[in-house]
Image (spheres, rainbow, N blue to C red):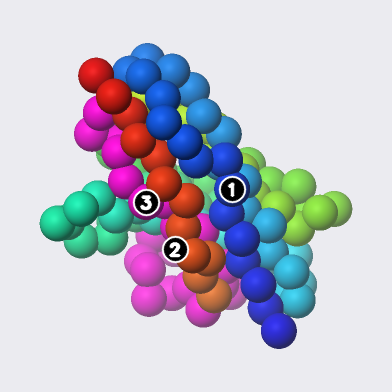
Amino acid sequence: QVQVVESGGGLVQAGDSLRLSCAASGTSSRKSMGWFRQAPGKEREFVAAINWSGVMTTYAGPVKGRFTISRDNAVNTAYLQMNSLKPEDTAAYYCAVGDRFSSVADSYEYWGQGTQVTVSS
């Protein structure tokens, strides 16, 4: 059974940093992993993705230069380092695991339950 578990969310002030973790179990580490987020009243949107080897990464425009995605295949975990956080980054952040390296949510087969990030101004 595949499990995807996010952690590391919290309440921070604008300009602060957070690091989210996404631990996958029950599946090979040779999978792409992606981060998506959903703010209240808005649709889920792509944040960042990394391929299985970590060689390829891609980011959504609003987070480029502030967020960094990485992974440690030894523990089948992906990370999202978020710096210079803004109130508009407030959302539930979801990790997804799939075969394709993609920014499209439907490309991912397995999803976590999400972790809340709240950025106060």
Residue at far right of view: 74
With 72 as the anchor, is 79 left or right in this view? left
- Determine the residue positioned at 54% across, 75% down: 110
Residue 56 versus residue 32: which sits nearer the camera?
Answer: 32
The amino acid type, in three-letter code, at marker 3 is Ala
- Determine the residue positioned at 29% across, 55% down: 38
- Determine the residue positioned at 61% across, 66% down: 4
The residue indicated by pointer 2 is 102
Q: Position of residue 113 (x, y in %)?
A: 49, 65
Quarter of the image where one finds residue 16:
top left
Residue at far front of view: 11
The amino acid type, in three-letter code, at marker 2 is Ser
The residue indicated by pointer 1 is 7
Quarter occupied by the N terminus = bottom right
Mark 1 closeness class: few <14, some 14–19, many ≥20 residues within 10 Å:
some
Which circle's residue, 2 or 1, is located before the other in the chain?
1
The residue indicated by pointer 3 is 92
Mark 2 closeness class: few <14, some 14–19, many ≥20 residues within 10 Å:
many
Q: Secondary structure at mark 2?
A: loop
Q: Secondary structure at mark 3?
A: strand
With 85 as the anchor, is 73 left or right in this view? right
Q: Is residue 42 magenta?
A: no
Which circle's residue, 3 or 2, is located before the other in the chain?
3
